[in-house]
Amino acid sequence: MVRRTRQTSPSSKGLQAGQVLRRDVLNAWGWVGSEITDSSSITRDHLLATCGFSRRSNHPFCRNQHKSKSRSARSSNPASPQAVNDIIPEDVIVISDGEDEGHKCSKKACKSNPNCLNYLGREKWETEESTIDNFLPLAKLGENPLLLSRDPDLPVGLKNLGATCYANASLQFLFRQSHLLAGVYNCQIPESKIMDSPIFHLQVTFAALQESIQSVFNPSKLVESLQLRTAEQQDAQEFSKLFMTHLDAEFKKQPDQSLQTLVNSQFEGEQVYGTMCDNCKYRSERRSNFWEIEVNFQNNSKLEDCIGALLEPETLTGDNKYFCVQCDKLQNATRYTRLQRLPPVLHISLLRFVYDLKTMERKKSKSSIVFPKVLNLTSFVSSVTGSNTTPASGNIYELRGILLHKGPSAYHGHYEAQVFDTRANAWFLFNDEEVTRIKDQLGDKRPTKKERNQDDEQDEEKPTGSKRKKNANGPRKRQRVDDSEDEAAASPHSRQNGSPSDIYSKDAYQLIYALRQSDSSINPEVTAPPRAMNVVNELNASHDMECEKYTEREISTHLALNSRRAQVLNICNGWSVASDDEDCVIVSRQALQEWLSVHSVAGLFPNEEKPDSALSPIQIDIGDILCKHGLLDHRHADKMKRISREAYTKIMKDTNCVFEPTLSLDDICSVCVHDAFKERMYQIEHPLLVAQFNEKANFGNERSGYWISKAWLRDWVLQKPKMHVASANDPPPDSGDFSDDVRCEHGGLSHRTTARRRISIEACRILISLFPQWKPSPVDDVLASERKANNFEYRKQAEIEKAKLRHMLEYASDKDLFLENVSCALIPLDFLRSWRRWINKPLEVTRPNNLDNSVFFCEHKMLNLDFPDIESTAAIIKRTEWDQLETFYNACPLISLSPSEEIELRFNLPVCSDCRHKRLLVWEVAEITVRLHGKRSSKDSGGSSHMQKTYGKNSARQSKRLRQRREYGEKRSIPVTKLMSVKDVKILLQEEFGIPTIFQRLILHGQELLDNEATVESLHVLVSDTLELHEESESLEISDSYDDVVSKQEGKGFGGTLLGVLD
């Protein structure tokens, strides 16, 4: 079969450089300027073409891909009669016009095709599995309780209530001490105190760890009964000691004799502190009990060596001699510590948190320690018979638990517990809610590079089902736990010297060993009391009921989604439009995507808070394709899609959804199209007018022609003028900002010769045809001579005033230069600035009209400013210069300043304090003075060798401005607003002085501005205020005094809790 496609002929005229060819735009607006040139001739077909709905548009009607796939599947079957009929004989030549075969439907190519309804999200409904995966979360069934069920091979975890990991780790230890567990279960609690009793809630917690069918138990009742603060991190060792003390106190209240001595018999050991005279062997000993052995250690220390160093004897000689009562004199002696008796359960606390005397803070030691799984303490336990000391036998302990502190700081971190479970005969890692079986190495596992790469590859695979729930908190919690993983691992040499069964750890904080002989007495069948089991059974029953309810809701939701799937697929199979004449509804691509992904199933899951919402139809907004008139906007034609009217009826009936508003092909906004037509005609006609103007703009006779604004003309001749506003006429040459370029405010020719240019009479006629209201200024001899005369007068007047007012020109702006022993006057600072600009450019800048000092007077006819306010609002000039100003300008009223003995200058008029304060306080934008102190200021001022003369004395000396800069610092003014923050002011100062914000100290009214978020208004800054800026050195000096060291605040510990009473 041969197919012959029609090819488009190349354009005879190419595009301009940089112009992008868009065939859809050419088809949509190709009729502008070719078919019609007047907006009144726009027809319905032209309106349709702007949105791509006209026959002249080249948008093909794409077939439904999913529907065609199903047909192709049927046609591939040889037994299908339709497939046989579709076979084309070989001698038939099919000639195609290329309308369909030349177009390949794709997501990118058909994104702006209104006739293509593929790639909108229908694939979510193709299979039952994809429908369930995509839309089941919209049913808001909640968390699947089945994912919270306990794994039979794993123990139960404890929920972290904020910062209670220290308590969770200790409770997992205590639960696996069988004697303690039995003791807790055997406690008798009065019925009246049972709900407030920590022992009862401990019974419930242990019972849940033993019999719960959920993977995690919430110990909130136990934490509340102990009055622990859930948001504060506490020390796990301290909690363990205080909690054991509390249990011991509660056990002693029980009538059972064995309970009263349970803690002492299981956890209490005995040690002896003694001194032996080296001469007569006399011993002075004192016995004491202990619940734990506290061990100091260095890096790579062995636990046995640390215990031996703890029990190392001390020799007392010289000034430390011991007074022997038997010898009755000072003698050399030996001081020793001896372990007399060890408990069945031995707690060894590793003193990992040390106190740094330099920083006056606690810090965590990063040293590693080596400890064995089997600890032989026989050599450290001894008994004394007469003068002989003999070692005790049977003190072999096995490791049962490791408490780990993760994190580099002593003030925060995370606790984990590695505990041996005798019931499962396995080690487990308890990380709050997450419990995992330890299969290889205890302590700190250091994976190899290969293992890390394998873990990274496994992390990239997203788990599904129950694995997703189990690993939900894994990466986040592991990130928090591995804060100390950046520390160096133990040296290879230490590992080679140690036993293969030794354990290395840089995070181990407490070790728990159990006497090997005590394993035979473990009773794994201990049962919880009935009241505690009732609570656990209720939780288990509630969990089973939640699982059943969830399963029922899930099944019903599946059925509803499958039914809705059939309806949606039926709609999608028939919503494509086959021709331009078919009745259709215009919607946006986003609206269809939202209907397929959200709104089509919204009616299946009614809102429980608004039960009536299920009855009202769901409105889907199509505002992204509407103009400001509420109709179809041709500028968003690439977002429009059209669906058949029949399909839209099914959408309303089956899914209770409506597209708001409902629009058809007759709802294209003609107003917006007319405006766009006018703009496109402007783009066609304007370059032609500019070209015609440029041909006529050159002039032959230099005395003929017209003046025009140079800035206006420079902009107007552009292909797209900046002054042009879409769908509006261009402003005439004498409008707005261009009016002063040719004529001055008095109607004469402006002296700004550089702001205008001359054009020919023919070019002026072209502009007059476009701007009939424009009145051009002709170029003739009279205006030229007048202009020359005006320029001469302007220059002459400027030179006269410059000569008469030289001090006012050169020094009045220097705010730090005051006139000594000279009568002065005050003028507005704005007038001074305008006057100086005119003096420098008399032909370009307008001369000030008058000098008005009335702004400095209040309603009470007194001054509303004082001497400190002058810097930001006024300027001081000599009184003789004021007299000259009165001859040049309408200057009034006079505000004079006279020298005095107390101060340099003072006003001759009274100052109204109330009005002055009001003026200084009520402002929006003002300039405030900043005085710089520091090395930069002294360097700038000291390096200047410029000398100036002061007025009033004939002697030449350094100017007062430089003297004041050296003494008080350099001053500058910066503009601020009331809404600016201190941080914004510091950024301005960084730009002005070049001082980084971190080295800035701002002082206002004697107080340092420490709050960077405070606004200028909240600080009550006045216009006359001066900010003191101090530049700090980059290297801060740290005092050796401990009083100057800012130490971290220690927490409250367990103060205010039930355990704090025992502390």
Image (tube, helix red, strand yellow):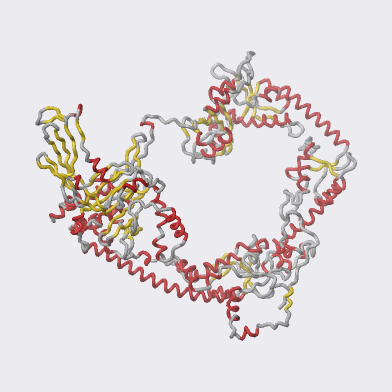
Viewer-proximal residue among 122 and 716: 122
| Residue 397, image x, y percentages | 22, 52
Residue shown at 46%/31% (left/top)? 1036
Return the residue nearer the eye: 885 or 1044. Answer: 1044
Give the side of residue 459 with respect to residue 533, left or right: right
Instruction: Tell me: residue 183, above or below residue 1011.
Output: below
Which picture quadrant has residue 159? Answer: bottom left
Q: Where 950 sits versus 718, above or below?
A: above
Q: In the drawing, does residue 121 fall left or right of residue 278?
A: right
Residue drawn at (40%, 51%) of the image: 480
Q: Where does residue 876 sit, x and y in percent of width and height?
A: 63, 24
Q: Residue at x 73, y 61 (%)?
A: 674
Residue found farthest to the top: 955
Q: Quadrant of the N terminus?
A: bottom right
Residue in front for this viewpoint, 785 or 56: 56
Q: Is residue 49 above or below residue 956?
A: below
Residue extending furthest toward the right? 701
Question: In what quadrant of the picture does the C terminus appear?
Answer: top left
Q: Is residue 503 left or right of residue 1012?
A: left
Residue 490 visible (yes or no): no
Image coordinates of residue 42 in percent, x first then y, are 75, 65
Note whether 952 is above or below 106 in the view shown: above
